[in-house]
Image (spheres, coloured by chain):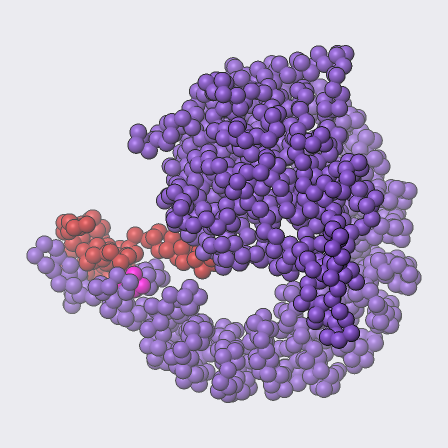
Amino acid sequence: MATGTTNSQLEHLQSKYIGTGHADTNKFEWVVNQHRDSYASYVGHHNLVSYFAVAENESVARMKFNFVEKMIQPCGLPIVRDD
Amino acid sequence: MDIDALPNPQRRSITAPKELLRELEEGGADINPLDGLVPSKRIADREDDYHKRRMNRALSPERKDAFATASTVNDENNVRSYAEVMRENELDKTRADLVRKLKEQQKEGVTTSNAESSDGPPAKKRRWDAKGPDDSDQHTVPNLSSSTKSEWEEEPAPTAKRSRWDQTPVAADGAAEKKRSRWDETPVASQGIDATPNTKKRSRWDETPVNLGAGGLTAATPVGNLGLMTPTPSQLQVPMTPEALTAMRWERELDARNKPLTDEELDAMFPQEGYKILEPPPSYQPIRTPARKLMATPTPMAGQLGGVYMMPEEQAQQGVELQGPEIPGVGSLAFMKPEDYQHFGKLMDEKDDADLSVEELKERKIMRLLLKIKNGTPPMRKVALRQITDKAREFGAGALFNQILPLLMSPTLEDQERHLLVKVIDRILYKLDDLVRPYVHKILVVIEPLLIDEDYYARVEGREIISNLAKAAGLATMIATMRPDIDHVDEYVRNTTARAFSVVASALGIPALLPFLKAVCRSKKSWQARHTGIKIVQQISILMGCAILPHLRQLVECIGHGLEDEQQKVRTITALAVAALAEAAAPYGIESFDSVLKPLWTGIKKHRGKGLAAFLKAIGYIIPLMDAEYANEYTKEVMIVLIREFQSPDEEMKKIVLKVVKQCAATEGVPPQYIKTEILPEFFKHFWIRRMALDRRNYKQLVETTVELAQKVGASEIVMRVVEDLKDESEQYRKMVMETIEKIIATLGSSDIDDRLEEVLIDGILYAFQEQTVEDVVMLNGFGTVVNALGLRVKAYLPQITSTILWRLNNKSAKVRQQAADLVSRIAVVMKTCGEDKLMAHLGVVLYEYLGEEYPEVLGSILGALKGIVNVIGMQNMTPPIKDLLPRLTPILKNRHEKVQENCIDLVGRIADRGAEFVSPREWMRICFELLDMLKAHKKAIRRAAVNTFGYIAKAIGPQDVLATLLNNLKVQERQNRVCTTVAIAIVAETCSPFTVLPALMNEYRVPELNVQNGVLKSLSFLFEYIGEMGKDYIYAVTPLLEDALMDRDLVHRQTACTTVKHMSLGVVGLGCEDALQHLLNYIWPNIFEVSPHVINAVLDAVDGLRVAIGPNVVLQYLLAGLFHPARRVREVYWKIYNNVYIGAQDSLVAFYPRIEDDERNHYIRYELDYVI
C-alpha cells in the first residue's frame, strides 16, 4: 500500500506540471511543450536573448516580447487527434 | 474409567452434580467465567446506554431514486418515496407524543395490572433453554408446546416504553397490508409456519434480535441475510439468541477439552494385554443432560422446518479444529464464530449450484466473499476484497448491502469485523457510484453510530464512508434522505444525523449546503429541526476548523436568530454553535459576529443555569477575536457576571467560567492591575479549594487558567498565593499546587521570586515531595523545574535536598527509590552549576552501590541518574572510576526490560564516546557481543543507541574485531537484526574511514548466501549515504561489485544495488566520477521495466540520482529511444521517467531536445538555437 501511495503521489506531482507527458502524448504536443519551455528559458536567460538580439538585429525587449508572443502557438495549428 | 461410555463415541462428558447444574441454569447459562478478566472485543459490550440506542434503528426499505432514469428504477413496490418517509416520520412523532401522555397518565396513579412486564428493564426472563428446577431429565428435546413459558412465548404487555413498536400489533395481519406502514412492506413469509400463535404480536419486546422465523424480518435489528430483494424460505435458519451462542461457544470449548476419549486413543494409551473391553449391560441407557444436549445441537425454535441448517456435529468433536473450519467453496478460515453460522448458514447446506437460480448464486457468491473478508486469513481477505470491489456493479447495490448491513448491525460484532466490513463498503461505494442512492439511508443507519464511537479510528472511518457516500449519491439525495431524520423523535437519531450532515458539508463544500441549512435553522414546523440545523453548524465548525472562515458570515447569520428562539434548548445549542464557530475562526473573523454580539449580551443577563453557561462560553470564545480596546471593555462587563458565577455549584458552569476567565485574561486589552484587584481575590477564594482537585477536568482547567493569569500578573503574584498550600493536608490538592507552580516557573522563570518566597517555596516542595504517598511524575517534574529555574540560588538548599535523596534511595518502596534516582538525573546540571562536585561524587558512589537493584523500573532510573552525573562531572572525575563502573554495566545489558536497556546503552555509549580509554579492549568486545542482542529491541531508540555505540567502540579499539562480529551477524535469520547490523557496519565505516572496512565487506560479498550478499549491499548503501562526497574515492573500487549485483537474478540484489547507486551518485555530484556512473547507468537501465513496487521505486530513484550526477542530457538520450515506442507498456515507463527528468531539470533540457524537422503543416525547428555570430 505504501508504495501504491508513493506511486500515485508521484503521478500527482507529475500531473501538476503542464509540460509532462504520458503514453498517448503525440509528437505535436511534445514539441509544443519543448518550444514553450525554450522560449521561457530564453526570456529567463538574459545573455541568451542578447545573443539572439544581435543575430536578428532587434532590440532585446522586442526579442523578449516576440518570444512571449510565440508561446501562444509555437508550432502552428494543432493536429486533430484521431481518437 | 467409565466403561459405559465406550461403545458410543458420540458426545458425552462427565457432568457436575445436578444441583450445581441447576444452579448454573437458574443463574443464566451464559455465565462467562472470564468475565471481567479479559476485555471484551465486542463493540456492544463496551457501549453505554446512549450508544446502544443505535440498535433501536431499523434498516428501512430502499428509497426511491428521484434521479434515476425509468430503466433503472427498481421494483416500485419495495421502495418508498420522500413523501412517504416524511409522513411516517410525522406518524412516529404523534405516536411518541401519545405515548408520553399515556405514560404520564400511568404515573398519575393508574396501577398496571401486569407489574412485571411494565418494569423499565424487565426482570431477567427465563430463556428458552433454561429450565425450572422441576424439569425432569427425560426432557431431551425442547418441547415447544409444553407449558414451560419461554421468553418469546410470553405475550408482551403493551407498556409505555418503546413507543412505536407496540403500537402496531397487527403488522403481520393480511388486512393491514394496504396501510403501508413500514412493517407491512416487508414480505412476511412466516405466517403459515409459525409455531406459536403469538408471533404476530412479537415486536421489539424480546430484544433479542433473533431470526425467529421470517417474523425476524420486522425486528428492528435484522439478523441474517434477510435481504428484501430475495426473501427465500431457506432464510429460516438456526435461530439462536446471541447469548445462547456465546454460551454454546464456551460449552463447546469446554467439551472439546473434556471430550470423551475415543477407542483409538484408549488403544494407544493402554497396553495391549491385561485389559479387556466389556460390553455395556443391555439395560443401560446413557444419561444425557438435556440442557447440554440442547446447546450442542441447536434445535430450531420455529418448529422442525425442512432444510434447516444444523450445526455440524463434528465441529464439537474435532475440538482442536475449533479454529479454522472449512466452509464449502470458501476454504479454511482463520476463525468462525457461531453467530457466523447464522449469517452464512446457507453456504453450508451443500446444495448443488446447478439447482440454484441466478439470484441465489449471486447471493452465495457475495456471502462467500464476505465470509472470506470477515473471517479469512489476510491473503484471502485481500483477494476477496478485490473481487468484491471489481464485481460490485455486477452484483448490484441491493444484493451487496442487504448482506453487509445486517452483518454490521449484529450485536456480537467485534472491532476488527466492523473495520473490515466498513472497508468493504468504502471500496464498493466508489464502484457503485449513483447506484447506491436507494440505499443511502440504510447505510447511514449503520454508519452514523461510528461518528460518535469512543474510538478515534472508528470515527474517522465513519467520516470517510459518509463523505464518500455523499460524493457518490450527490447532495440532493443526501438531503432528501436525511431530511426526515432531522426532526426525528429520538434525540440520538438527531444527534447522529447532525454529525453526518457536517461530514456531508465537508465533503461537498459548505456553500452547497448553506441554502438547506438556512431553511432548516428557520424551520417553523418543529423546534427539533431548528435545533438539529444549528447543531449541524456547530459540528461543521468542529469538524472543519478554520476552513469555515470563507463562509463564516453566512453561517453566523444562519443560526443567529436562534439566540432568541422561544425554546430554551435551541438557544443553548445556538450559543454553543457560536462558540464553536468562534473557536474555529480564531483569531480572525470578529466582524462576522457583529450580528450576534447584542443578543449574546442581553442573553447573559436573561439566562440562568445551563443556558447562561452556553452564552458565557460563546462570549468567552468571541472575546479573543476582538481588538484590544473592545476586548477590554467586553471583559469588564462580562467579568461581573463571571465573578458572580464563581460561586456556582454547577460543575459544568465552573468549567466554562474557568475557560472564559482564561480566554479573557489572555487578551491583550486586559490590564494586569485589573486582574490583580478585581479577579484574583474572588478567583482564589472560590476556585483554589480542595474540592477542585478531585475532579480531573476541573483540576486541569484550573491549572491552565491560573497559569494564564500568571502570564499577565507575573509569577510571584500567583506563586505567593498558593505556595503555602504545598503543605496542605490533601495530597491531590498539593499536587495541583505543584503542577501550577511548575508550569508557571517553566514559562516565566524565577527572576521575580524573592528570597523569602524562595525559601518558602523550596521548603514546601521538599515537604510535598517527601509526603507523597501516590508517586506521581507531577511532584518530580515540579521539583526538577523549580530547582533548575532557581539555578545558583539553590546552592544553600542542596545539602538538604541531597540528604533527602540519599534517605529516599534507601527506602523500602520501589517507587520512592525510583523517584529519588529520577530526581538526581534532573538536578545533576544544577548541582554542577553550584559547584557541588563532592556531593555529586558521593551520590555517584551511592548509586553505583545500588546497581544490584532488582526492580527494573528503579534500576533504569538509577542508570539514568548515573548517566546524568557522568555527563556533568566528566569521565576523569567520575567516582567510582569508569574502569570499575563499566564492567558492572556489562551484565546489566542483558536485562530485557526496555527502560533498563535504554538507560544502560545510553550510559555505555556515553562512556565509549568520551572515555573509552579507561576500559580494556577485551571488555569492549564483550560489550559488542551484548549489543548484538540489542539490535532486536522493539524500541527504536534502543536500536539506534546500540548502533551508534558500535561506532564509538570501533573508534576506540579499531574496526577489525567489531567488523568481524558484525559481518558474522549478517547470517542471522531475523530481518530487523540484519538491517540494524548493516547500519552498524556503515556507521563503523563512517567513523573509522571506509578504507578500513570496505575490503572486508566486499570480501564478504563472495559468500554465496542471499542474506549476506544483500546485507553487504545494504551496508554499502548506508555507507555511501553517510560518507557523502568522501565516496568519490571508493566508487571505482565498488563498481565491479555493483555490476555483479545489478546483473543478479535476485530482485533484492538489484533493488539494493540501485539504492546504493542513488546514494553514491548524489554524493559525488560534480566530482568527476561521471564515467563510472554512466557505466552503472547502463546496468541499471534494463531494470526500468520491473513491476515489483519496491524494485521499480529503487530503480527510478537511481535514475533520478544519476540524472543529478551525470546530467539530464545523458538520461534524455536514453529516453528518446522509447518515448514513442510502438508498445504502450514501454511508452508508459519511458514517459514516467521522462516526466521525472523534466520536473527535475526543465530548464537544462532546453538545450538538449532533439532536432525535429518541419513537416508541411507545422514547423518544429527551434531556429534560434542555430544562430552563429
Position of residue B1062 relative to residue B827, above or below, is: below
Measured from the top left, where is residue B260 in percent x and y?
72, 59
Majority SS type along the magenta span:
helix
Q: Is residue B964 left or right of residue B608?
A: left
Position of residue B154 relative to residue A69, above or below, is: above
- Regarding residue B208, the answer to whether it shows in the image is yes
| Rendering colour (chain A) | red
Measured from the top left, where is residue B873 in percent x and y?
78, 71
Measured from the top left, where is residue B530 in percent x and y?
54, 21
- B199 or B425: which is nearer to us? B199
Q: Is residue B1133 magenta?
A: yes
Please provide the residue range marked out in magenta.
B1131-1135
Residue at (76, 42) in percent of width and height: B137
Quarter of the figure with the C terminus of chain B: bottom left
- B1014 or B991: which is nearer to us? B1014
Residue at (45, 46) in percent of width and height: B364
Can you tell which quarter of the image residue B543 is in? top right
Residue at (20, 57) in percent of width and height: A26
- B1029 or B154: which is nearer to us? B154
Position of residue B564 relative to residue B129, above or below, is: above
Can you tell which quarter of the image residue B1083 is in? bottom left
Q: Which chain is purple?
A: B
